[in-house]
Image: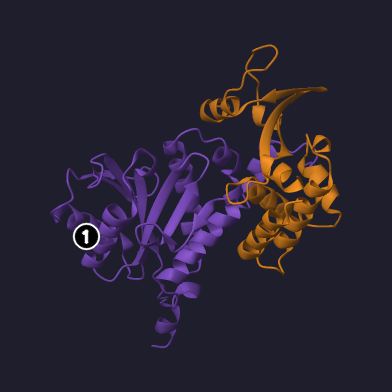
Chain colours: A purple, B orange
Amino acid sequence: MSLESFSLSDLKKLQGHIPELGNFPSRLTVASYEEFVDILYKDLDCIVARMEENPELLKKDKEDRLTIDVKNQLCAMGYDAGHDTKIGGHVDLVVKKAAENWKWIGEAKIHKSYDYLFEGFQQLTTRYSTGGYNNSQGGMLIYIRNSNAQNVIETWKSHLKEKEGVENLQISECPVNPLSFYSTHCHQRTHLAFKARHIPFSLHFDPQDHKSSNK
Amino acid sequence: MNQQLKDQLYSRFSEDWGDSSSQFDICVKIFDYLLSRPIDQLRHLTTGSLKVAIGENRSDIDLIKVIQYLCGDRTGVLSLHFEFVDEENYYPLDNDDIKYAQNTGKLSHPRTGEYVENFEEKVLMYFTPTPLIIDIQD
């Protein structure tokens, strides 16, 4: 690898060691809000994978601490990301591209109950997001400390479907992560479609090795 | 020199990396280098020339992470550009060329129009300062 003539191929080789470099050029060539969000999701997937590698280190972290960790990693990639920014309230995570006036908002919850998740979904969709064309997507960051994240997500999906007041709700699978899914519904404020990605962080940690050797 | 804007950037580097990190040092050194040179001498910065500019033995990976950071919306200090190299000839590429190539796996040679095999080996990255640097210099 020559730094003087650093090629896309050289960058790809480094990506094997540093995944967050993988989207570096794509992140800077986005030409639409949809492309901006697509790349953001790829980067968030890298962050989720990294945090899931060491759940034992995150066991005592509260919602804000976990979200600040996500925000810090996005900032290091170059994103204009913020935590606790005032937009109709104090949003957990906002990522902006100011030059284009694009905005993506994330609401973070440690899973305690499905009504608690729904409260977060309502905050995201009725308090923080404008639902305009340049803020028509957002995300639920769901920190799961229970075992069986798949069951949590499937139950959450069913719970969301049963809730009243979420107009024209449609659920679609995430083609990348089977634990993740998308919801689309009619945004209360604009009546434009609002698409949310529901992103689980599987942070359960309960190794059985010491338990079995102690028997 | 717009000292207020300059200090805002320093604060942001510090907030994002921590004062004692290698990445913070690299940010500051690149930023100071950009502010210390006439803009017309900064029209084609490579990762190699930035490594020389910071003048210390830093890891290539830390340097590239910082370049990625400085190119992003968070700071908007550097602009990323692409060029196609064929033997001794360099051809500028625009973002749409790169996007098309990355989506389809095909890049047309800027002169001949023929598809280029292994184009990723022949597309180089380089950088220029953004208007923000000019604003701070003024």
Q: Position of residue B32 (x, y in %)?
A: 79, 53
Provide the chain ID for the residue under circle 1: A
- Name the amino acid type tagged 1: Thr
* Nearer the observer, A153 or B134: B134
Task: Identify the residue position indicated by label 1 in the image.
Answer: A155
Judge whether residue A179 can be spotted in this image. no
Residue found at the very far bottom of the displayed protein: A214
Q: Residues within 10 Å of mark 1 (few under 14, many from 20)?
A: few
Q: Position of residue A207 (x, y in %)?
A: 42, 75
Q: Position of residue A127 (x, y in %)?
A: 29, 56
Q: Position of residue A146 (x, y in %)?
A: 32, 70
- Quadrant in which the C terminus of chain B is drawn: top right
Using residue A53 as the reference point, say whether residue B5 is left or right of it: right
Total numbered circles = 1
The secondary element bearing badge 1 is classed as helix
Question: Measuring 13% from the left and 54% from the top, which residue is drawn there?
Answer: A164
Q: Where B26 sits versus B122, above or below? A: below
* Nearer the observer, A72 or A198: A72
* Nearer the observer, B74 or B7: B7
Question: Measuring 67% from the left and 54% from the top, which residue is drawn there?
Answer: B5
Using residue B2 as the reference point, say whether residue A78 is left or right of it: left
